[in-house]
Amino acid sequence: MPSIELDALVVGAGFGGIYQLYTLRKLGFSVRVIDRAGGVGGTWYWNRYPGAMSDSESFVYRYSWDREDLKTWPWSHHYLQGPEIREYLEHIVDKHDLRKDIQLNTELLSADWNAQQNVWRVTTSTNEVFQARYLITALGLLSTANLPKIPGLDDFQGELCHTSRWRDDIDLTDKRVGVLGNGSTGVQVITAISSHVKSLVSFQRSPQYSVPSGNRPVKPEYRQWLNENYDEIMDGLPKTSTCFGFTESTTTFASVDPNKREEVFQGLWDQGNGFRFMFGGYSDIASNKEANEAACKFVKTKIAQIVIDPEKARKLMPTEPYARRPLCDGGYYKQFNRPNVDIVNLQDTPIDHISSTGVKTTDGKFYELDALILATGFDAVEGSYTRVRFRGKSGATLADHWKGGPKSYLGSFVPGFPNLLMISGPQSAFTNAPPNIEVQVKLHCDLIQRAEKLRSAGTNTVIEPLPEAEADWGEYCNELANATLFPSVPSWIFANIPGAPSLITRFFLGGLAKFIEILDGVAQAGYDGFVAPLGSGRKEV
Ligand code: NA7
């Protein structure tokens, strides 16, 4: 079968893939996006579970580059529900006439670098073969579901569904429901369904700190103020670390009068948002033990106040430092005051097995269920890469290369895999996603333009980092992570699934502003860290 020849093939039609298509097309390249989903949206196409909501506020959970759209596209609440995010991305795709270059229901099966021709050869589930000089992966951090290995899980005869494979026809009304997992997703599901299921049991392995999101309808005067200030707000986002649209604190916990410290926490609690609670009141909650313990104590006091049944409150009480991705919710803890909502602490009483009709725990209790929801997270970050074959120039695969843990240079590039450019690859910045994606997309465009210029001048240039650049980046990311409390708690920031190597952090925890500063340095130094000389100076697209 003849192959389809392109300058660039982009894999994934979420925030990253859509913007990469837009930018490369604008630069005159032939580009196609493929996605295994039946629609655009990436993460938001798949995560249709009840309560799915972004916990970045609405005004920053969008692209910054269409300024007219920023001011005109409507949204009603301070946070966006999953369907609204899909609708927004559908709208962007239509508005910019991108749909004609997006091929849905097309899954990448393998990608092999052809070193003779300097092209990637990609096969897909549609039996097509693509040949592209640049392969840009926008696979998403969280797209390969983590399915727990629990004896008897496959025997369950009721509704069994992972939250990222939710079907619109699932109706839980008046059903006996079990929810396994209580990360961001589990917390949202439990909050959304408790009021209308017959009964709900949360099977919880690790209790979580969660603060209110502060979601509420948007007042017209707020939107007007935003519109008047949107340029400044969007230009300012990449100058911050987390890009959540609030002012990040520079005040250390110790510098605040002990009598005033509680007030700061209360103010953050009242305003809402998990990232604001962690980074908006004090600068060192995530790095200073004393500050962190104070935050933990504050949330635990709230749990004790909210949850009436002391036994349920005990089970909900976190024991770890506050050092996972911060959560927020629309009334999670108070759901446990409903008589139909119960909680099983799997650390006290692990699951013994699952049968056709329910879950049995090691204390002999049996929970009869009509539905079991798996909110068990993802084979995050590298999971989407290692489940298919990406074969580089030496014949080794990415899975081989990442045996000791996933690595990259600047979150985008891997030695031995020329012209493979990852959006949100391992060790990219840990921030509100869209601003970070925009920076990476622009970096890719800049480098592709440089490489193409050299190519038209007759040089066989590829974009490939040096092994030592990758090693140094990994080391630097680890150093930054080790200066925080995050490594003290197991989470998908370090090891995504049981048995995954956790020696290397999966993120750059230095923030986007710092990341951009580093990019500027790399560019000024003539793109050091890359095999081919790519020139110097960073160009905005
Ligand atoms: P997370 O945050 O990885 O949470 C997964 C949850 O599932 C967490 O509570 C896990 O417990 C639990 N889990 C996973 N495997 C098991 C088994 N085998 N038994 C019991 N419990 C289990 O995924 P989410 O989907 O909630 O959120 C991912 C990100 O999406 C989130 O951070 C946001 O960025 C959006 P554990 O804590 O490991 O003990």
Image (cartoon, grey):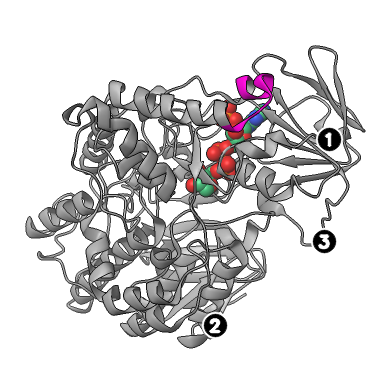
Q: Which residues are the magenta region? A: 306-314
Of callouts 3 and 1, which one flags the residue occurring earlier in the amino acid sequence? 1
| Residue at which label 2 appears | 99
Q: Position of residue 100 (x, y in %)?
A: 54, 85
Residue at far front of view: 259
Residue 385 in view: no
Q: Nearer the viewer, residue 334 or 522?
A: 334
Q: Nearer the viewer, residue 263 or 373?
A: 263
Q: Quick check: 169 above or below 467?
A: below
Q: Are marks 2 and 1 in contact (CB under 8 Å)?
A: no
- Name the amino acid type tagged 3: Asp
Q: Is residue 127 left or right of residue 2?
A: right
Rendered image: mark on residue 169: 3
- Name the amino acid type tagged 2: Arg
| Residue at which label 1 appears | 154
- At a point 39% along the width and 45% down the height, the residue shown is 275
Q: Residues within 10 Å of mark 3 (few under 14, many from 20)?
A: few
- At a point 74% along the width and 48% down the height, the residue shown is 193
The residue mark sitting in front, 3 or 2, is 3
Query: Element under label 3?
Result: loop
- Name the amino acid type tagged 1: Asp
Q: Position of residue 347 (x, y in %)?
A: 64, 17
Taking the magenta stretch, the answer to whether it contains residue 276 is: no
Q: Position of residue 7 (x, y in %)?
A: 39, 76
Ligand 1: does it lie within 8 Å of the C-beta at label 3?
Answer: no
